[in-house]
Every structure is written in structure tokens, then in C-alpha cells.
Amino acid sequence: MAPSEIPRTVKAVNTTQLIHLDEEATVCGLSRQHGGGWLAEYADPEATHYLWPALVHSLNHRPEHSPHWRCMLLLALREGQQVFSLLDVLPASFYALPENLDRATKTQIAQRLLASMQTVAEWSEHHG
């Protein structure tokens, strides 16, 4: 599949993998909804988080990292809440993640992400 084609799948990641993807986005100059170190501080270190590519995104000033995918992120926080966030992910990094969810779980996660969920920004207003 070409980087300009979004895979229609949800992938589960642990917190270590998520922090690595976030750090990669920082190094590449891609978008994230949280500052450096935020995930290490607030993401549940034992939780599973979920990424679902939503759109192809390109940066004229970063052609070496374009196109990439803007993913919806179902993020589990230390205090037990789940919030909505976004994370830009390089296609090769997304494909490197294992495909380990069944169809029903993927559908359930996608429905949660499409529902009205509290965002990282909204959560931060009340807890930051």
C-alpha cells in the first residue's frame, strides 16, 4: 500500500511504543497534541492505546516525511480515563506495529473514536 493510501485498520500500542512514535513525530517535525514528556507523565504505563489512521497529511517544508498519516488516538491515562488525541505517524512506523486485534475489537475502537470523547486539551484544562 502506498503512503498516500490510508490503511483501514486500528492498531494497539503499549505506552513504550506510543512514546517512541511521539518522539519520532517530534524529530520529524510532525504534529502532536501534547508537549514533550507529556505522554510519559500522563499516559498509563500499563495500558493499551489505539491508533487509527484518519487522513493523509503532507508538509511542503518536510518533503522527506510526507506524506504521513494523521492518526486518531484513543489514549488511556494514569487515572483510568480514556481521551481522544491525534498523532502524526510515518507509514513505515505504522506498518511495523503488529496487527493483533480482531475485527470486532477494531470496530468497537473505531466507534469510540468517532463518538464524542473528551479530548486531551479538554482533559488538560481540568487537570493541568
Image: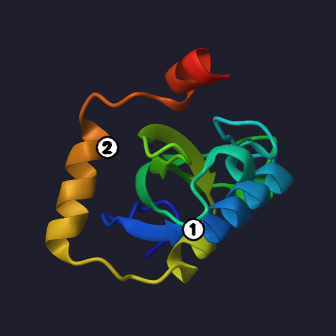
Q: Quadrant of the C terminus?
A: top right
Nearest-to-viewer mark from 2 and 1: 2
Hey, what amino acid is under mark 1? Pro
Residue with the mark numbered 2: 113
Name which quarter of the figure residue 109 lies in. Answer: bottom left
Q: Secondary structure at mark 2?
A: helix
Residue with the mark numbered 1: 91
Identified at 40% across, 60% down, the residue is 6
Q: Position of residue 59 (x, y in %)?
A: 70, 42
Side (left or right) of 20 relative to 74 = right
Identified at 51% across, 43% down, the residue is 79
In the foreground, 52 or 36:
36
Reply above or below: 69 against 103: above
In the foreground, 75 or 11:
75
Q: Secondary structure at mark 1?
A: helix
Q: Residue furthest left?
A: 104
